[in-house]
Amino acid sequence: MIVIVEGIDRVGKTTFCEKAASLLNAPVFKQTTFHDDGSHPGPTAMVEQVHALTKLLLCINSNIVVDRFHLTEAVYGKIDRGYDCLQEMKAIDSMLSRRKDIVLAYVEPTDIEESSRQHGDDLSPHASMFAQMFTDSQIQNKVSCNYKTICQAMLWLSNLRSKVS
């Protein structure tokens, strides 16, 4: 099973990833497109990297938890970096939707003002775009939760695991 965890900064994605990894006895892969010096490679290189990682993920036959992936690149790329790669990320979403053992988990903000304060910027536009992209995703197995409901999401994930195994 491949679990892709998405959401804005400061909402509990790491907690979700740790719990999912423990449940599935799986490693956590933290997706990032930033260079070691903190710079971003640009939209073309970012799309190529996510596409290559998608092809790799589709070859994996063991459990893995992915902390941020294609939705993150679409949301933060568009809002923070001015990249319009929405169509490319939708194509990647379509590729991922072909596997029945892929889960898209969206960790929603419990308190958008607090998440924004901790981050240092207003994350409301990001949260809105994540919510819309999650809704529009073609991935069949989707779960949405917030920090307070992660345990319920783990129960759902456990039940799904027994069905797709």
Image (cartoon, rainbow, N blue to C red):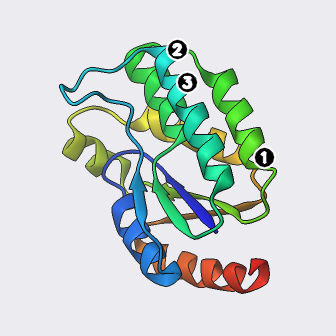
Front residue (pair 32, 153): 32
Q: Say which element carries label 1.
A: loop
- Which numbered disc flags the more N-terminal residue, 1 or 3? 3
Q: Say which element carries label 3.
A: helix
Which amino acid, by three-letter code, is at mark 3? Val
Which amino acid, by three-letter code, is at mark 1? Gln
- Give the label, 2 or 1, closer to the camera: 2
Q: How many marks?
A: 3
Above or below — where is 4 with respect to 148? above
Q: Is residue 84 left or right of residue 68?
A: right
In the picture of the structure, the residue carrying the numbered disc 2 is 44
> Which label belongs to residue 47?
3
Residue 116: quadrant of the picture: top left
Q: Residue at x 36, y 56 (%)?
A: 11
Q: Is residue 30 visible?
A: yes
- Which numbered disc flags the more N-terminal residue, 2 or 1? 2
Q: Residue at x 63, y 24 (%)?
A: 86
Q: CA distance from mark 1 to mark 3?
A: 19 Å
Q: Could you say where residue 31 lies in the image, as x and y percent from the top left?
A: 42, 45
